[in-house]
Amino acid sequence: MSACCGSARQERPPAPEPSLEKRDYKRGTYPEALLPLAGGVFEMGDAFDEGYEADGESPVHEVELSPFAVAATPVTNAMFATFVQATGYRTGAERYGSSAVFHLAVRGRPEDILGAVPGAEWWLVVRGADWAHPDGPGSSWRERHDHPVVHVSWHDAQAYCAWAGVRLPTEAEWEYAARGGLTGKRYPWGDELEPEGVPRCAIFRGTFPERSSPRAGHLTTTPVRSFPPNGYELHQTSGNVWEWCADWYSPVTYRQSPRRDPRGPSRGRDRVTRGGSYLCHHSYCNRYRVAARTGNTPESATANCGFRVAADLAVTPEDQG
Ligand SMILES: [Cu+2]
């Protein structure tokens, strides 16, 4: 994963969280109605040839999707708290005891800062940073009920989905949903980053990584509905936080994937993340475009990556004609 976008776990992962497999817990539900999407054929990939070559955003290719449903926003802190309270689940970051926080945002004592991430020194490893303490031990999710949950690994996202009876979107579903019905556009709302000078997404504004412009109005996450939705009523598919997808990531996925309901490679090292985050900046990383793709190891959890849920749509006999 590009270093501006997030830091990858280097250490060996701790033993998997046993609570959900071993313990009986009451199934939860996703607290909001999912948006039903018709699926069908769409053009996936970067129509502008603007992506980093190593990411594999091209070629543009036709993908045909079955109907599915997707959440309007990523899972929020309040939603994740409900899951944790119901199950006692402990995230990977909590079991590690630390996670990386953007240097300008850290809230904790100096001794909580364990070091910088090599090659990406704007990421500080902070003791006690986790989903419930997004900027470090001096911060709390309770100040940010409607912000996306962060410091969650792909495994943590899977655990939430299993509890709530939903699943992660495939990468193709994610891009289809994020495009909001537009074809070949750069962003979920069109080709211009700031139509009429109005920001449409939470990305880094200022001089990366030293100084955030006051105009940005945020240093880290923003509420999930801070900006208007796309044509399918999805919010923040560009910026704010990266979103885990179900698929393994490979830069050559598009050259090999089937046309119909692609699910990515059968194995890999990283899981796909999409959408970019509040740290993306044109000077360094332009992955807030709707075709942009990268990945991270499934045990990694960062202060700028969360997830959105999806579900299959049952096909009724009438639909089949
Ligand atoms: Cu980025």
Image: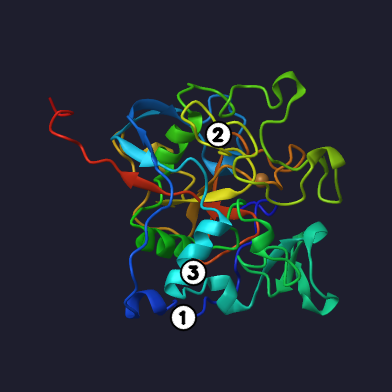
Q: Earlier in the sequence, mark 3 or mark 1?
A: 1
Residue linked to disc 2: 290
- Per the image, label 2 sits on a secondary structure element best described as loop
Q: Are marks 3 and 2 in contact (CB under 8 Å)?
A: no
Q: Nearer the viewer, residue 300 or 220?
A: 220
- Closest to the camera, between mark 3 and mark 2, is 3
Residue 103 sits above or below residue 245 on the image: below
- Asked whether mark 1 and ligand 1 are closer than 8 Å, the reply comes as no
Q: Is residue 121 visible?
A: no
For the residues marked 3 and 2, what is the alpha-carbon distance in whole angstroms?
31 Å
Q: Nearer the viewer, residue 94 or 53?
A: 94
Q: Earlier in the sequence, mark 2 or mark 1?
A: 1
Q: Earlier in the sequence, mark 3 or mark 2?
A: 3
- Asked whether mark 2 and ligand 1 are closer than 8 Å, the reply comes as no
The residue under label 2 is which amino acid type?
A: Val
Q: Residue furthest top?
A: 196
Identify which residue is drawn at 81% across, 50% down. 209
The residue under label 3 is which amino acid type?
A: Val
Residue 112 sits above or below residue 274 on the image: below
- Per the image, label 1 sits on a secondary structure element best described as loop
- Per the image, label 3 sits on a secondary structure element best described as helix
Q: Residues within 10 Å of mark 1 (few under 14, many from 20)?
A: few
For the residues marked 3 and 1, what is the alpha-carbon distance in whole angstroms?
18 Å
Image coordinates for residue 265, horizontal then vertical, percent: 37, 50
Image coordinates for residue 310, horizontal then vertical, percent: 39, 46
Residue 296 sits above or below residue 52 on the image: below
Q: Residues within 10 Å of mark 3 (few under 14, many from 20)?
A: some
- Which disc is residue 15 wearing? 1
